[in-house]
Image (cartoon, rainbow, N blue to C red):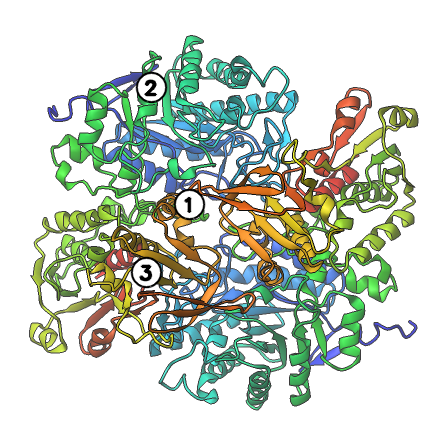
Amino acid sequence: MAQSRFSKLLSKLNVRDLELPNRIIFGSHPTNFAKNNLISEQHVAYYRERAKGGAGMLVLEEQLVHPSDLPYEKALFGYREEIIPGYRQVSEAVHAYGSLVVAQLNHSGMQSEGSTSMRELWAPSAVPDVVSREVPKALETEDIKEVIAGFAKAAGYADAGGIDGIEINAGQFSLLRQFISPLTNQRRDDYGGDLSNRLRLTVEVLLAVRKALGQGKLVGLKLCGDEFAPWAGLTPDDAVKIAAELEQFNLLDYITVTVGSLFSLHLYQAPFYAEEGLAADVAGKIRQKVRLPVFAEGRIHRPQYAAGLVEQGVVDGVCMNRALICDPELPAKLAADREDEVRECLSCNQGCLVRRSMGKPLACMLNPLAGVEAGESKLTPSHAARVKKVLVVGGGPGGMEAAVTAANRGHRVSLWEAGPDLGGDFLAMGTAGVSRVLAYWQTELSEVGVWVVKGKPGTPEGILADKPDVLVLATGARSAGPAFSGVNVRQIPAREALTPVEQGKTVLLWDEIGDQVMARVAERLVAAGNKLYLVTPDFFAGNKLAQTMELSFWNQRVMVPSTEIFTSHKLREINGNTAVIENIFSGITAALPDIDLLVYNSWPKPEDSLYTALKDRVREIYRIGDCLAPRGIGAAIREGYTVGRSI
Amino acid sequence: MNTEFLHLFSPVRIGPVTLRNRIVFPAHLTNFADNHMPTMRHAYYYGERAKGGAGLIITEEQSIHPTDLAYEKLIDAFDPRVIPGYRKITSEVHRHGGKIFAQLNHNGQQGSSAFTRRALWGPSSIPDPMFREMPKVMDKEDMREVIRGFCLVAEHIIKGGFDGCEVQGSHSSLLRQFISPLTNERSDEYGGSFENRMRFAVEVMGALRKVTGHHHALGIRLSGDELVDGGLTLEDMKKAASYLCDLKLVDFINTSTANFFNLYMVEGSMHVPLGYNTYAAAGIKEVVDVPVFAAGRINAPAQAERILASGQADLVCIARGQICDPEFARKALEGRHAEIRQCIACNQGCAARTGLNKDLGCLQNPASGREEKYGYHSITYPSRKKKVMVVGGGPAGLEAAKEAARRGHRVSLYERESALGGQIKLLTKGPNREEFSDVIRNQITEISNFGVDIQLGVEVRPDLVARENPDAVVVAAGSEAGHCCIPGADQPHVLTFYEVLAGREVPGDRVLVIDDIGFHQATSTAEYLSYLNKQVLILTAGLYAGPDLMTTMDIQLWYRRALEQGIEMITNSIVKSIGRNSVTIFNHYNGRESRLEDITAVVLVGHPRPREELYFRLKSKVPEVYRIGDCLAPRKMEHAIMDGFRVGRSI
């Protein structure tokens, strides 16, 4: 193979006695796939798919080490012997493709949750978590012993299950970090005070785990490189010291560096607002101080960026968790010089961020198969028995996915898009990476030979004249009509305000949804120097941004002096250029004067007129995505895929 | 025969089924399902209420179609594998002389596609205000499929041994979405006029009637009043009810009110009056000739009897009252109603847990939902009776003492204050929070049966323990205000909320409440101060004040009361320092600093500190020492009571 820019990223790495086939790591993350708190068939299929796609090392979803910790209902009980068969299945599945598989062991401490188990939380000190606000119990000496024994026991089970090693979690959600950090450790015994005391538990855990593991197995550490709480929390300098100190014990084989902690939850699985590779800097500093292999985790999605980090020696390997959720074949595609076929993660967090998601299983907005790999044998597109003439109307994400999937199976597919460009609602997302994902679809469409016609709106006559065997309608949604009739103020729907034309104006944004469309419009209006009145009936603005971790970033952008946010309010009327808003609880009204523009974010309606017109006139007709029910990109892609593989 | 509650304990016929009394344990979410199947946990849970004397049990909703998986633990009743589980449930209830109906439902647009990965179904393109997901507009084929689903499930219900079916047409149902102009904008024969909007419900009930036949009861639950502008009113629902009765489609009508625009009126908390929904049943009863059920904060036999005696309803639904005390009916029947552990509608164990995808529990009854392990049959009596000292007479200590004494231990309970109750005595000072005192009343009532030696005004120190020489000590010493590190917090005009609720004078007339907790402590204190005619500001680092009130259905009504009282809310903010009459704060998103002027007093609602000293002094000096409740880790009351219960049951 010729020297490519991915050579170093794809080169082998020796870690103690084992060899990673390449430097791409599928790091640990919650999935909600567990059944009865044990590794499920879906887990096995999920990891198998990433090993098959070429990831060098996989770190499994965290395994709990003690019953005092149940951070989410579907967490895995690493302290139960019944976990062993699951480990066996995963390790066999992963080893079949030559990848390594490591189990992450964790105790979440005060970042756990006590109301599922109805037990108190355990922590270094009685310091509550910022979000759950639950006050924990400070561990007693015998509790500490139990935790250490739990780590050792869980390590033994993983070992028995054929796992290649253990990663100890001292990262974002961990008791060990809580012990290391003065932010959460206020103890006055041997486990609190100076750094060596605060590190004591971590060292004891590492010792116990090393002892419980067989020869040749790996022990890694996930380390928080920056708590972003400089008044008391761990700083990058602290992290370098910690890594150096821990290395001296000769217990560790690698360190994975991440960032974020109690006061920076929005950096856990950081959304697109965060800088690329946000832990790379501190990981690089650590790598300069230690001889151990050092990996970075946190928003490393672009293959070129990942390759650069390894090439330049910033780190030895990269965790590309979300990138591999989105495209499990990423490593294989790079190796085959098919980089332009990589479906790149957008850090949208709309499917994969399942922590505190009330049990929802992991999914991916862009990858319709993520989270349902176990059913994949049923889903794998087989070649169509009879080649059909397929017409897809609407070149948004759903239409493109349907066209690609159907053409892949041998159908003759045309895709009509009314506008000048493919992309639909996807174009409007405007986040970094969107253009690359569009380029990916273009590549796929041309590769599988879909006949794409732009600037061609679907009409009943045109469609009937085309005589398709199968018609797939992916015509999207249309905005609701203006919020008020007969007023002078100009009104536009939010979806049409994504590219702000206004500058230095006073804009009223009336939001009934709290979604990403509203968020993008608001931040762009603010950035363009408009005075913004944001009115929402919710308790806070940006309801749907909380689960994706966008909210903190967005608040930082929109909460500027020229913005006024009115929560628990509805828009009652417009008189001249004055808007009257009303508190939904008290009925008290307020007047907002001098409005230049009203942007309303109301629920869109399905654009289903073609379906109504043609439903009894075409033999096989399907509706997918927003024209079935406006729900956004993820649903559109899933349905596009489902239709594409079933026709 | 019971003469006090003549109506309550008179048998009644529901279609072909005769019930022993008028007490219904109505449908409510439990989250006990496993892999979408009913479990033994359901069987024990419902069985315990039948054993406790309930006349009729109605199960939680059973999903009739794969498009409805509104939440993770909904039961897939359209899958025939439910039948064995159903048989276990029904035989457990029948064994104890109760009757049991299954509730059939499709939640329509009041759901989520997260688990099904397919579009929700609804009458029109209108999303639910809570789930916020746009449904697919159902076409006629979809509607036929739903009807087939109802019928298929009815067959499973019959095979599973149930006595009848209740169809959900109330607060969370596709049927109501069709009936209500709020959610039905159709222009076909299923939308528009009253008859058109009723058509789908009529078709469903008509099809079901054919399946259920003459041996099984069939009824419907209706939201008697949607309580939303543009929604269904009681007059509309009277019309709907009599329409269904005229068509002979129902053997009974159950009621509720509201929908998800105002979920707080579906499971009204203690801030909503007792029997707040009864008017809906009474209105419908005026126009129909089948038995009508009343529901909504009916928690005492006398109240229930009055509803029946006055002809407002024929049966009463007592959900939370029987979650809290499964023997509600039997105790009333036997004239022991003073012993009923009365529900306080705190919503902390039932609504709050199930709403967050957790299994149902009860603040006052730790055995609720855990009947197999903790039900009445499970009490074990230790071979050696121990001498037990319980230190602290709050809810945790009382619970531990009660359960230990129930099992025959010799228990002394020490309380340093002059009355039992611990922090509950303060909580009940909050406006409309008085019902919390029933927790203590209930515990004291129960404990009085078991001969616990209660010592008031005694502070337990290690020397007392040494003198008493107990086999076990349970430390339930509670918590107290923690240290506040805000500069200026040591000034005399800075108080803790404990001090305020205990009645201490709060200086001046403009008070800032700083909330770090987010539950009732700050909101109650603010309200309390506002009723003393003070201008109150609540400051929180969170996105809005009182976030945890969302889970207990208290937030909307609190906002109403708070805003009426002129309470101001400052969100996303952190206090930098407290001055003599001003407070400097900053917004933690943009760092902008500002000063609140003319603040005459500051009230701190900070995280409490465990009173753990006694525990550590006794640890390893007494054969058995336990720490429970807030002195272990300061948490919500259900945790304290659960801790006490577990220790009391295991000593």
* Badge nearest the viewer, 1 or 3: 3
Which chain contains the residue that carries disc 2? B
Task: Give neighbour class at mark 2: few <14, some 14-19, many 20+ (Cα, 10 Å).
Answer: some
Task: Give neighbour class at mark 3: few <14, some 14-19, many 20+ (Cα, 10 Å).
Answer: many
Residue B177 coordinates in the image, percent (x, y): 52, 27
Q: Which mark is residue B510?
A: 3
Relative side of B68 to B282, left or right: right
- Give the residue at mark 2: B283
Residue A39 coordinates in the image, percent (x, y): 56, 57
Determine the residue positioned at 15% across, 59% down: B383
Q: Nearer the viewer, residue A144 or A605?
A: A605
Which chain contains the residue that carries disc 3? B
* Badge nearest the viewer, 2 or 3: 3
* Badge nearest the viewer, 1 or 2: 2
Task: Answer with the quarter of the image where residue A158 lies.
Answer: bottom right
Label 1 secondary element: helix
| Quarter of the image with the N terminus of chain B in it | top left
Amino acid on which the number 3 mark rests in the picture: Arg
Q: Which mark is residue B354?
A: 1
Estimate the spatial distance between the alpha carbons at disc 1 and disc 2, rounded to whole Å: 31 Å
- Mark 1 or mark 3, earlier in chain: 1
Relative side of A495 to B176, left or right: right
- Mark 2 or mark 3, earlier in chain: 2
Which chain contains the residue that carries disc 1? B
Amino acid on which the number 1 mark rests in the picture: Thr
Q: Are marks 2 and 3 in contact (CB under 8 Å)?
A: no
- Mark 1 or mark 2, earlier in chain: 2
